Amino acid sequence: MRRFGTASVLIRYKTDMTTTPMSRAVPFWAAFGTLTLLAAACGGDGDASGPNDSGVVIVATSNVTATPLPSRTKEPTPTPSPTPLVICSPNPDPAPPAVLQVEAPAAGEKMTIPVHVRGWSANIGEEGKVVFVAIVDQEQNVLQINKVPPQPRDFRLPPVGLTVTDFTRPFAIDILLDDVAEGTPYCIWVYQEVDGAGKARGVVQVPITIEPN
């Protein structure tokens, strides 16, 4: 007999007891049931890892909280920068900011007629000098050239970066154009000198779009 895992049941019968086949069967099945219960209680052959045939459902619980995996934040799509208006041809001779500056209009600005142009020159007040303001279309045709005289400097501040002399003055003009039926790009040329071949020197270019009124 193994020490663990099985159980033995000793059944005694009295020799003088009168039994019938049915009465003898009852103690046998009672013993068999007892052996079965003992074997189940002891785990069969002592193997604790065996399958659970008792019909008892074992529910495993845990106090461990699952840590959620970090989610990757979608990077925002950068907003594209506006494409500069391509209407002005390459500047033949850019003017340094210390000599000539255009304060209005801003590059790429949408405007209506009249187009107000203003700025400063470091030497426009010297011996009757002027500033030339020209309008050029998409096909590089010069539509008009305006001679702009200096304005009084009193109570006005020159822009940063401009060289201030005794002849530093502001200038301004309102440009008129006809037959503007839809938004049309133009290029404003501002300069002070022209070489012997009639080409502008010291130029500031400003691309704009003129909308109909």
Image: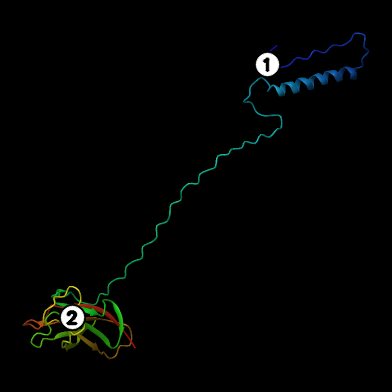
| Residue sitting at x 13%, y 86% | 130
Mark 1 in CB contact with mark 2 (< 8 angstroms): no
Number of callouts = 2
Find residue 36 and report its horizontal and vertical position in percent. 75, 22
Task: Relative to 118, say whether 52 is above or below.
Answer: above
| Residue sitting at x 71%, y 29% | 54
Find residue 121 and report its horizontal and vertical position in percent. 15, 80
Q: Which quadrant would residue 145 be assigned to in this image?
A: bottom left
Q: Specify whether 79 is left or right of 154.
A: right
| Residue sitting at x 72%, y 21% | 39
Task: Relative to 127, say whether 6 is above or below.
Answer: above
Q: Which quadrant would residue 186 be assigned to in this image?
A: bottom left
Find residue 64 and report its horizontal and vertical position in percent. 55, 39
Q: Specify whether 73 is left or right of 151.
A: right
| Residue sitting at x 68%, y 16% | 4
Q: Specify whether 186 is left or right of 203.
A: right
Residue at which label 1 appears: 4
Q: Residue 195 or 182: which is nearer the viewer?
A: 195
Find residue 60 and report its horizontal and vertical position in percent. 62, 36
Q: Which mark is residue 126?
A: none
- Which quadrant of the rendered structure holds the N terminus? top right
- Which quadrant of the rendered structure holds the C terminus? bottom left
Q: Secondary structure at mark 1?
A: loop
Question: Can you see residue 188?
Answer: yes
Query: What residue type is disc 1 on?
Result: Phe
Query: What residue type is disc 2 on?
Result: Trp
Q: Which mark is residue 120?
A: 2
Q: For the view shown, which residue lies furthest in the front direction?
A: 155
Question: Can you see residue 139?
Answer: no
